[in-house]
Image (cartoon, coloured by chain):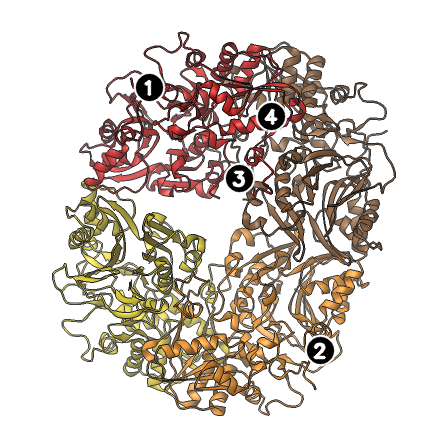
Chain colours: A brown, B red, C yellow, D orange
Amino acid sequence: MSELPRHPFDDDKLHEECGIFGVVGVPDAANFVALGLHALQHRGQEAGGIVSWAPELGFSSARRFGYVRDNFTSKTLMDTLPGSLAMGHVRYSTAGHKGQTAIRDVQPLFAEFAMGGCAIAHNGNLTNAEAMKHELIQAGSIFQSSSDTECIIHLMARSIQKTIPERMKDALRRVEGAFSVIAMTRSKLIGVRDPLGVRPLVLGRVGNGWALSSETCALDIIGAEFVREIEPGEMVIITPDGIESFHPFAPAKSRFCIFEYVYFSRPDSVIGGRSVYETRRQIGVELAREAPVEADLVCPVPDSGTPAAIGFSQESGIPYAMGIIRNQYMGRTFIEPTAEIRNMGVRLKLNVNRAIIAGKRVVLVDDSVVRGTTSQKIREMILDAGAKEVHFRIASPPTSWPCFYGVDTPDREKLLAAHMTEEQMRVHLGVDSLKFVSLEGLYRATGQEEGRTASPRFCDACFSGEYPIRPSDVVDSGRLQLKRA
Amino acid sequence: MSELPRHPFDDDKLHEECGIFGVVGVPDAANFVALGLHALQHRGQEAGGIVSWAPELGFSSARRFGYVRDNFTSKTLMDTLPGSLAMGHVRYSTAGHKGQTAIRDVQPLFAEFAMGGCAIAHNGNLTNAEAMKHELIQAGSIFQSSSDTECIIHLMARSIQKTIPERMKDALRRVEGAFSVIAMTRSKLIGVRDPLGVRPLVLGRVGNGWALSSETCALDIIGAEFVREIEPGEMVIITPDGIESFHPFAPAKSRFCIFEYVYFSRPDSVIGGRSVYETRRQIGVELAREAPVEADLVCPVPDSGTPAAIGFSQESGIPYAMGIIRNQYMGRTFIEPTAEIRNMGVRLKLNVNRAIIAGKRVVLVDDSVVRGTTSQKIREMILDAGAKEVHFRIASPPTSWPCFYGVDTPDREKLLAAHMTEEQMRVHLGVDSLKFVSLEGLYRATGQEEGRTASPRFCDACFSGEYPIRPSDVVDSGRLQLKRA
Amino acid sequence: MSELPRHPFDDDKLHEECGIFGVVGVPDAANFVALGLHALQHRGQEAGGIVSWAPELGFSSARRFGYVRDNFTSKTLMDTLPGSLAMGHVRYSTAGHKGQTAIRDVQPLFAEFAMGGCAIAHNGNLTNAEAMKHELIQAGSIFQSSSDTECIIHLMARSIQKTIPERMKDALRRVEGAFSVIAMTRSKLIGVRDPLGVRPLVLGRVGNGWALSSETCALDIIGAEFVREIEPGEMVIITPDGIESFHPFAPAKSRFCIFEYVYFSRPDSVIGGRSVYETRRQIGVELAREAPVEADLVCPVPDSGTPAAIGFSQESGIPYAMGIIRNQYMGRTFIEPTAEIRNMGVRLKLNVNRAIIAGKRVVLVDDSVVRGTTSQKIREMILDAGAKEVHFRIASPPTSWPCFYGVDTPDREKLLAAHMTEEQMRVHLGVDSLKFVSLEGLYRATGQEEGRTASPRFCDACFSGEYPIRPSDVVDSGRLQLKRA
Amino acid sequence: MSELPRHPFDDDKLHEECGIFGVVGVPDAANFVALGLHALQHRGQEAGGIVSWAPELGFSSARRFGYVRDNFTSKTLMDTLPGSLAMGHVRYSTAGHKGQTAIRDVQPLFAEFAMGGCAIAHNGNLTNAEAMKHELIQAGSIFQSSSDTECIIHLMARSIQKTIPERMKDALRRVEGAFSVIAMTRSKLIGVRDPLGVRPLVLGRVGNGWALSSETCALDIIGAEFVREIEPGEMVIITPDGIESFHPFAPAKSRFCIFEYVYFSRPDSVIGGRSVYETRRQIGVELAREAPVEADLVCPVPDSGTPAAIGFSQESGIPYAMGIIRNQYMGRTFIEPTAEIRNMGVRLKLNVNRAIIAGKRVVLVDDSVVRGTTSQKIREMILDAGAKEVHFRIASPPTSWPCFYGVDTPDREKLLAAHMTEEQMRVHLGVDSLKFVSLEGLYRATGQEEGRTASPRFCDACFSGEYPIRPSDVVDSGRLQLKRA
C-alpha cells in the first residue's frame, strides 16, 4: 500500500514537496479541505493530513499515507473531523528519505501551548533548519519528527508572547528560507508567505467563509471564488468575521519560483494573474522561434510537455500528434519477465504510437531534463518504432543547480546540465538535435517582455545558480559550493 | 478496496467488458501475461485473473479484484504462477450486477475434464446463453458462476470428443454470439474468434514463443512482434513448436465492431492494418467537413475526444487548446460538503481551464453521447467559466441501440438518441450547436472510401439497429423489440 | 492473516475436520448460526461459512478464512445474511493440503437445481469419493472444489427425483463413509446422519424454531434446549411447522466415534446422554487403577489432559497441580533468536511452573500420543525444570491406525504406536514410565461396564484397526493395507 | 483490528497497564524482546513496541496495535530491528481513553538529546504527572503523547547533567508515583524501580548478555536464568561488560503491590522468592479455613480462580471439578440474535458444564470482585443449569479503593465493595453465601506468618485505602477523598 504510482518518469522530474489548504466559516469544513487537497495532489502524493476544530470536541486530526481520494472519502473517517474550521496538507517524500517517512512526519503538525492548541502546515523549506534544531535541542526541546516545520513549533513554544499569532510572528522571524504556511487555532485560520514569496498561497471566498490554498485550481473544485494572492511577507488572520493583514517581516523584492510555471503548478491554475497553461503554450512558441527544425510531427512527452508542444506546433506549422500514448493505469513495478525487454519501466507508462511515428521526423517536446535517464529511454523507444529523426525541444533552460526552497532535487553532480554543454547532452542522449528554451525566452513567456533583468522578478536558482536566500545549512556544512558571484 | 476509480464520466460511456491475453513458449509466462493485461486494463478494470501451467505443479491460478498493477506485481504472488504457458483476463462488471461480482465470476474459468484440465477466458457475449444454461441445468450441470462463459465449459464437459480442442469446437458450434476466446491445456494455447469476428484477437511473436492478445498495444508492452490477426471463424492451436489453424464454423462475412475504432481500443493499437489514433483523428476531419462552425477554440473532452479534436482543428484551422484539464488522480466519491457545489462528481475529475475559455466560442469534441448526463454537466461548467458559445461535435453517430455482443450498454430507453432527434438533443443539452458524425463519414474515416454499403463491413448495430447476430435471449424473452427490417 | 494460532501442540494431535450448525424458524437466523459456529470452533479453525435464505432476496452466503469471531461479528457482514433460515460450517484443513485451501472449498457448498437452490455442509468423510468423482467427471460433471461434499451435489444434480429431499436420499444412498450432513432449501432445514452414526448431530429447540448442531455446547450458547440426537441413518426435514423423520438407509448397528469422547468434543457437551467431561475424568480414574505409580504431583498437559488428570488425582490421592502453564495468547512462529533456545515452539505456548516442579516426582496426564514429538519436548522441559521423575499417563489407547471418517490423521508410518511397543515408546520418549489406558478401560469409562465386546458399540478403528466402513479409496489404490481379519 | 479479545470478564477485572522487557549483549536482541513481551502479554494487550540499536544504523523502532504474536513475528519487521541491544513494552489502554490511544502513545518513547538518543518504557503511574506536565508546558515543552512517561523525557531534556543516566536520575527524583522503568542509550540498558518498589522488575542472565523483565516467566521463555530482583529504589546500568548499581533515591521501606500475587502476575512467575501459583493455591487454603461450607463440588471461575480453587478443594476435601468451561476462541461482540438470550457476553466466553452441575451444591472460587457484574451473570448461568446452591469464595479481600499506581481501576463509586458490606453484596449477587479472604489471611498466604502488621510489607491500598504514596493529582483536584487516617 505504501508504494503508489506517480507521474510517468517520476524519478527523472523535480518534485514539489507540498500542497496546503485551509478553510474557515463553512459547515463540515474538513470535506472542503479533502476536496482542495485532492485538487492539489500533484504537489505531493506520499501522504496527507487534515486537522479540524469543533466546539466541545476541540481539535481532531487524521493523517494517512497514500492518496487523498483513498483516505479522506470515507464517511467514517470524515465524521471524525467535524467543525467549520479545518486545514490540511499533502506531502511528497524527499528522495533521500523515501520509505522512511513515519506517520508523525505527516503534517499538519499539532502542538498544545499554554494558551491552547495550534496546527501548522507548510510548503517550502527552511534553509537554516539544521542550525536552529541544534540550538533548540541544546535548550531542552525534544523533536518528534524529521520535518523542519517542527522548528517553528518549538520556537513558538518558547516565545514569551501571549497569543498564538504573536508567537508565530516571533518564530517566523527567526527562520530563513522559503515558506508558505497555513496554521489554525481554535478560532482563527492563519496564512503566511515568506518575505520573497517563493512559494504560492492564494485566498478564496467560499459561501460565507474563506479558503487558503496553494493554487487556484483547488478553489475551483470547491466552487470558491478567487479573491487575491497572499502577498510576499504578508500574514493574514482569518475568522468568519473577516480578515486582518499584517506584514511582520522586513520588506523585500518578490522572487516567485519560476518552475511553478514550468512544471509544478496545474495548467488550470492562474498565478500572478496569468494562466499557467497559456504560459506553457507560450514557452513552446518561444522554443519554435529560438530553435526551429524541419520535421513532420510535433509530439509531446505526456502529459507535462503537452501545452508547450501545442505552442510549438502552432508557431512552427508542423502538425501536432499524439506520438506517445500514456497508460492511464500507470503502474507499480511489475516483475520483469526477461532481461531482453529493455525499458520495462517506461513501457508500463508509455507506448509509442508506432503506426504514426514510423518513417517520420519527430520533434519531441518535454518540460525539462533533470538526470536525462528518461529522455534516453524515450529516444530509444521512438527509434525502435521507426522514427527517421528525433529532435528534442525542452520547455525550460538547462537545470544545473539544486533547489533548497522546498523542491526535491538530486545532488548537483546528478544533474545532467551541471557538467555538460547542450551539445554534450545531445550526444549523450543520442538525438539528432537538442535545444532548451533560453532563460530570456522563458521570462518572455511569463509576460516579462524585457526578459530577465539585473533584478529578476523570479527565483530561477535552478537555472542560474543565483540563490536569493542563502542556503545556510548546506553551504555552512560544505555540502554545496555557491557559484562565484 | 472494491470501488476503484475509472475513466472520467465512466458511467456515461459504453464499456468493453473484457481483455484477454495468453502466451506460450517463454519462461515465466505469467509475468508476460501480467504486463499484457496491464496494457489492456482499459478494457476492464473490475478484476483480473491469470492461469499458468508448469510441469509437476500443473495448473496454478490467481484471481483478484482491482487493477492488474495492484495485484500481479508482487513477487510472492507471481512466484505462485510458474511455467512457460499462461493466460489471463481483465473484466468489466456489467452495470446491472455492479458490486455483486463474486471472485468465482472472475475469469479465466477452469475445469478438470477426464482428459485433463482446461482454462478458458472470453471477450464478448453469447446471445443464447440463457436458453443454453436452462437446458444444461435440466441435464444435471451445476453452474458456479454467473458468467456466460461457463456454458462453454459445460458443453465441453458433455462432449463425447476425446481431446480438449475437439470438445471446444463441439461446444463453440452450439453457442451463438460474439466471442474471442483464449484457452489453454497443459501443452497448448488456443485462440478462437466467432464466425463474424466481432471482437478482436491478434497473434504476436515473442522470443521463441507466441502471444495472443485482444489488441496490439499489449504486444508492444512485452516487446512482441505483431504477426497477424486471428481470422473471423478461425481457431489456432499453438505450442512452442508451431501453430495449427482450423476453421470449425460455416464461413460468414466479417462484421468487426466499429465502436472499437471509436472508443474501446487504445489509440496506439492497430486494427485491420489501420492505426486507431489515425482513424479517430480522421473522424475529426470528417466532422469538420460535415459540420463546420465558426469558433475560437477546439477543445477535446479528455481523454477520449483528443484525437478527433486534433483532426477537427487541423481540418478547420481553428486553434486546438486544452480547455478542460483532467485530474490525474481521479477519484472515488468524496463526501459532498454542501448542496451548493453542483457537479461535484465532475469536478473531481475535470476542471475547466477558465483563463483560456472565458469569452471564447468553444467547439467541444467528444467521442460519443450515451445518456447525455455528462455532456450537460460539461456544458454547464464551460458556461460557468465564461464561454461565449458552446458547440458540441461528436465523433460517432447517435447511439440508439443497445449492444449484445460484449459491451455494457444501458437499456434502450436510457439512450438519449433512442428517442430524440439531433435538434431535440441539442435543446436538451442546452448547447449552441450539436452535430454527430454521419455513419457514412465514420465508415470513410475507417478507410472505406465508398462509405457504408448494403453489405457493411462492420457491426454497427448500436448506431443502425441492424444486428448481424440475432440476440435470441433478449428477443425471445420480449426484452427487446427488433427494428422492423 | 492466513496462519492462525491453534491448540498447543496442534501438529501433534488428531484433528476433527468440521462442525456444522443450522437453524430455522427464528428471526435473524444467521446470527444464531454465527454463535453456534463460534461454540464449535474447536472442530475447525481454518475457515467458516454461513448461508441464509430470505423472501425476495433468496439465498445469501459468506465464506471466510479465519475464526468465526473475527468474521461473523460485523454488522455489515451479518446484514447481508438475512432471513429466518440459515446454516453454517467451520472447517479444519487437512494436513496434506494446508495452505492450499481455496475459498471455494469452504462450505456450505451451494447449487442451483432445476427446482431451486440447495446449500449443503458436511462433517465426516466419504470413503468412496475418489471413485465417485472419477465416474461423475466421465459423465460430464465439472468439479469446482476439492471437497468430497461436492460429489453429493453432483449426484443430486443428476437424480431424476422431483424434490430436493428425494434427490438427497438418492445421492446419499450412493456414497459410502461417515457423514453428518446439514442442508437447506428455501423452506426446509435438513439433517442426516450416516447409517452407523459415526459423527454426531443433535437437535435443539430455540424459541419457536429448531436447531441442528454437531454438539450440545452450541445449543447452550444460543439458549436452545436439547431435544434429542438425530439417530444413525435418520434424515430429518424441518420447517417452522414441524419435523418429519425418515430412515432412507438399510438399518445398521450404531458405531459412534469413541475419539469424540477422548478429545474432539468439548468437555461441556453431552453425547449419548453422557457428559464428555465426566467421561474424561473417569478415564483418569481407570488409568489410576490400571497404572498406579508413586509420585508427588499429578499435572495435566493443558488443556486437553485436565479432566483425566483430575480423575487420576482423585483416584490415586496424589495432589493435583498446575505444573505446566499455558500462555493464553498462544502464538504464531516467532523468529528464533538463537539456536541454543531449544523447544522454542513449545515455549511459546507452555511454560513449566518451575517453582512447584523442582525436585518432585511428576505424573503428567495427556489425552493421546500421536507422533510423540510434543511428548518429548514436554519431558525435556519438565526435566530442565528439575523434576526428579516423569511418568506419562495417556487417557487413550495407543493410536496406531489412521482415521478415514473425517479426522485428519498422519500416515500410518508416522503414528508412533504403529511400529513401537509401549516399552519402546517409553524409551523413545525418555520417561520413567509410560502407560496408556486400555481399550477395555476406555469402554468402561464411557459407561460400558462390560468393556469392549465382540460387537462393539463404538468405532475405535484408530486403536483397533477394525474399520466398520471399508475405506475403499485408500484400500483399492493400495495406499492402506488392512489388518488381517 | 483494533478490538482484540481479552480475558473473560475483562471489563470486570482490574488491569495491569504494562509489561517491560529489555536485553543487552546477545545477537538479534529484538527477537528476545519479542519473545519476552509475548510472555508478558497478560500485562497489556492493546499495543506493543520494540526499540533496538545497532552500529551505523543507530536506533530502530516499531510500534504496533495488537498482540505481540501478530506483529513481531514477521521476518520483514524483525529485520528492521537489528542489534544486540533492545527493549520493549506492552500496554493496556486505560478505561477512560479506550479506543483513543494513538500510535504515538505506544511505548517505548524515544528522544534525541544533545548527547544522543534514549528510549524509555515504564510500568506504573506517576502520581504528580498532571502538575508536572502543566509546569513543563509553561516552560516551552511540547507534549506529543498522553503518556505520563513523557514527563520523564522532558525533565531529562531540560536537565543540565552531561550523561543520560545522570539526567535520568535528575528526572526520576522530580516525579512521584510507582514506576519500574527500562531505558536504553546506544550502549547501555538501564533499569530503575521506584523507592517503594511497587511494581516488579527482575534481572536475568541470557548467554553472555543480560535481561530485565517485569516477571520471571519472560526469562523462562528465552531460556534466561533468573539472577535477582532489582531492589526498590535501585538503578542498574548494564553493558555487555557488567552491571553497575546505584541508589539515587532516599531509602524507603518496600511496599510491593500485593495484587500482583492475587491476579496480575502469571502463576508460573516467582516474586520475592515465592511461587505465584503456590501463593494463590495457599489463598484457597486460607479461604477454606476462614469460610468453610458444606458442598458437593469446588469449581474455579476460569482461568484466574483455578489455583485458589485447587487449594480450597485440597483443604476442604470437597472434590474439585471443571464446572465452567472456557471457550478457547473467546470472542469479540457478536450481533445478538434476540433479546431473550440473556448473558450473551458471558456465553461467548464461558459455558456451564450442565451435566455435572445439575442438582449440586457448588462452591465457586474467583480471584476478586470489582463491579460484581460478572459474578451476577455467572450465578445466573449456574442456577439456570440446575445447581442447588451457589457459594462464592473470593481469593482477595473486598476491593474498595482505586489504584493510582499503574492499575486501571473503575472510579471508587463503581467498586461494589466501596459502598456495600459483605452481606449486602451477597444479597446483591443473589448467592447462598459469599466470603472474601481476610487481609490477614492474604498476608499469611504470601508467607507473612504474622499477617498484616502496623508496618505492612505490601501496598494493599485497593483493600485498605492506605496509600503509601500520596496520589497528588487526584487528591489536589478533588477527584478523590482520602480515608481519614
Q: Is residue D354 shown above or below A89?
A: below
Give the quadrant of residue B252: top left
User: Mark 1 touching mark 2, by CB under 8 A?
Assistant: no
Q: Earlier in the sequence, mark 3 or mark 1?
A: 3
| Eye-nearest disc, 1 or 2 | 1
Numbered tag placed on residue B332 in the rendering: 3
**Disc 4, SS:** helix
Q: Chain of mark 1?
A: B
Residues flagged by tags 1 and 4 on a common chain: yes
Label 4 chain ID: B
Q: Nearer the viewer, residue A273 or B44?
A: A273
Q: Which residue is mark 1?
A: B466
- Residue D374 position within the rendered picture, expressed as x and y whole percent measured from the top left: 48, 74
- Label 2 is found on which chain of the structure? D
Report the residue that reaches farthest toward the right: A250
Amino acid type, residue under disc 4 in the picture: Ile
Q: Circle 2 is placed at which residue position?
A: D470
Give the label on residue B382, or none. 4
The reply to whether the C-beta atoms of the residues labelled 1 and 4 are less than 8 Å apart is no
Q: Considering the numbered disc 2 on the image, is that residue within a helix, a strand or a loop?
A: loop
Disc 1 or disc 4, which is closer to the eye?
Answer: 4
| In this picture, residue B13 sits left or right of residue D83 | left
Whole-number angstrom distance, CA of label 4 to CA of label 3:
23 Å
Which residue is pictured at 47% across the width and 70% down the height?
D8
Q: Residue at x 82, y 47 (%)?
A: A169
Q: Secondary structure at mark 1?
A: loop
The kind of residue on which mark 1 rests is Glu
Q: Position of residue B214 (x, y in %)?
A: 40, 26
Q: Give the distance between the C-alpha atoms of the residues marked 1 and 2, in whole angstroms.
A: 92 Å
Is mark 2 in CB contact (under 8 Å) with mark 3? Answer: no
- Tell me if B127 is positioned left or right of D15 in this view: left
Q: Amino acid at mark 2?
A: Arg
